[in-house]
Every structure is written in C-alpha cells, then in structure tokens.
Image: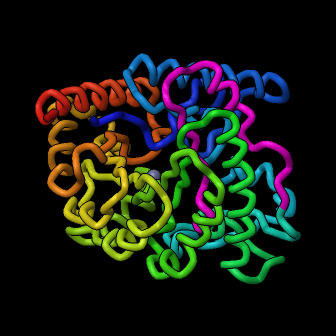
Amino acid sequence: MFETTIAGSLPKPTWLAEPNTLWPAWRLSGTDLETGQRDATLLAIKGQEDAGIDIVTDGEQARQHFVHGFLARVEGIDFARRVEIGIRADRYKAMVPTVVDKLLLRGRVHPEARLARVHTRHKLKFTLPGPMTIVDTIADAHYGDRIELAMAFAALLNEEARALESDGVDVVQFDEPAFNVYMDAVKDWGIAALHRAVAGLSCTTAVHICYGYGIPANLAWKASLGSEWRQYEAIFPALASSRINQVSVECRNARVPLSLLGLLEGKDVLVGVIDVATEQIETPDEVAATIEQAMAYVPRERIIACTNCGMAPMRREIAYAKLGSLTAGAALARRKFGS
Ligand code: ZN
C-alpha cells in the first residue's frame, strides 16, 4: 500500500547540462554526451533507490525536453523549419519544428532503458510524451489534420513503448499536459490516440496530466483559473472508462478539488503529494495528510504517492530532499492508515 514513484524527470548533474531550466544546453557533446547521459541515468536511479522510491524512472537524463527528446528521433520533421505557434491554447508562444513528410521512427528513442533495467531491481517506469501534447507542440505542413497527425505519432509511440516493454520496463507513462486544455478533444480523439499508443502492451500503462511546471506562463494561467480547478471533471469519466491503468495528477498545493479523484473509479491514482513549483520541502506529516485527503475518494490500495509533476528544472539537492519526504510521508501513511 502507498507505493512511491515520481512523475518522471529529475534535475541533471551540472557537468551534463545547464541547471535550473526547462531547455538546458548540454555541456558535453558527441560520445562524451552519450556516456554522460548513461552515467547520469545510473545516478538518477541510485538517488531514487537511496530515497526509498519504489517505482524508479530514468530521471529523463538523456533527453533535453520531454517532447523534443522524442521528436529528435523521428524522421519527417524539419528541425530547421521553425515557426512560432501559440501552444496550450495560446498560453505561451514557442518556436517549434515542422512536420514535412510521413513520420517514421529512426531506431530506438530510449536505448538507456536497457541500461536502467540492468542496474535496478526496483520496478522501472519510462515516460513518453502523449500524442495530443506532441501535436500541440509542433507545426504541420504534411498531414493537414490534427487527428491524423496524432494517430501517426501514436503509432510511433507504440513502437517505442513495445520496445520499452521488451527491455523489461514495468510502467510506460504518457505525459499529456494538453489534456486539461482541450477537454472536448480528449473525449473526441485524445483517448483514442492513447489507446493506439498502448496497443498490444501488457505492461502497466499510465497517463500524467497536470497544470504544468512552475514557469511564469503557467503560474499566470493557474491564477486565472479561479479558486477551484475543475478541468479534470470533464475528462476523468472518459479516462475511467479507458484502457489506461494509472492516472497521475497533482494534488499538493493544487486547487483541484480532490473529490474529482472519485471520478477515476477502477484506476490506480498517482497522487501528487510533492509540489514541484516551490523549494519549500514538504514534511512527512504534510505528505501523509495529502494521502489521507485522497483516501476519501480513492481506495487506499489504489493510491500511489507521487510528485505533482517532473522535477527537471529544480535545484538538485531540493529535488532529492523532497523525494526523502515523499517516501517518509508514504511510510507514515502506511503506519497510520494501514489496515
Ligand atoms: Zn506535469
């Protein structure tokens, strides 16, 4: 009960990449970069194990960004043809590459998965960007239709997800921060695209939805959402009837009414008990209290304690201190609420 995991990413060592930013420049190149990414992956696993995390990840140490790390391995995208688009319903502008041809996967996206598998006996999770979030983060000059483009990406995601499963990865998670922006599209095609991405998988599947990192554009958006964030209300029933096994949502310091978690009947819920937008370190009591609040709406055996979102842009010592509180808080909850 109350296993622990993280949303996905961790800060990278400063010898590998520029710290405290979402789009870090690498500080190595060529084979040094590849070796550095592998070493950092092992450090991330070791750091999680030492903190007591049950379901560890690669910490996303080998990718620059959660969407573009995947796109970098896809043929049919012109990275020189960058255009400015408004993403997440125009919440912020980004320069994005353009799809110019039929999409194909150029070999493995995450060769580090096998390395990670060899070096940990813990359950292992890998994250991939969700099809809707990818489509929202790229320009299209070839497919001419968002749904067709999403399904094309979903097929590539499925190829990599199956390879991850063959590597021995226990959980494949899709990150879909776009899900609480385009609620109607989630029901129309977003979940169908996820189903395409998980087709044929027998490992555990998860989807992470959130209100974004603590960057200024997101903080301003959050401030505009009012005292209660009810976006999940529109999509949770559809997720509950989907074939995805787990749903990861932010709860700590979020204005999401936790009663909405009750709409996820039948799913494991990765309850975000660690706020990644503040350097203030939660106490184990605070972590246990968030778990207790979630228990009012989610059966305790379906609760997994997690971070609200990725920790990539955080200070490294803060991130790992928060992981210590996460596991201490889950242990406390086990003692207090274990039946
Ligand atoms: Zn997130």
Q: Is residue 144 left or right of residue 277?
A: right
Does residue 80 appear anywhere in the picture? no
Q: x and y percent of residue 81 in the render?
A: 83, 65
Q: Is residue 51 left or right of residue 73?
A: left
In percent of width and height, residue 185 lies at 52, 79
Residue 127, position as x, y percentages in the image: 57, 45
Q: Looking at the image, is 207 positioned above or below residue 185?
A: above
Residue 40: give x, y in percent of width and height.
62, 23
Q: Nearer the viewer, residue 94 or 134?
A: 134
Q: Is residue 118 visible?
A: yes
The C terminus - image quarter: top left
Q: Does residue 55 sit above or below 297 in this rendering?
A: above
What residue sits 75% from the left and 34% below the top? 111
Q: Quadrant for the N terminus, please.
A: top left
Picture quadrant of residue 287: top left
Res 203 quadrant in image = top right
Which residue is painted at 28% across and 36% down in the image? Answer: 2
Extent of the magenta region: 104-132
Q: Magenta span has 233?
A: no
Report the residue at 42% width, 67% height from top.
239
The image shows residue 74, relative to residue 114, as above or below, that is below
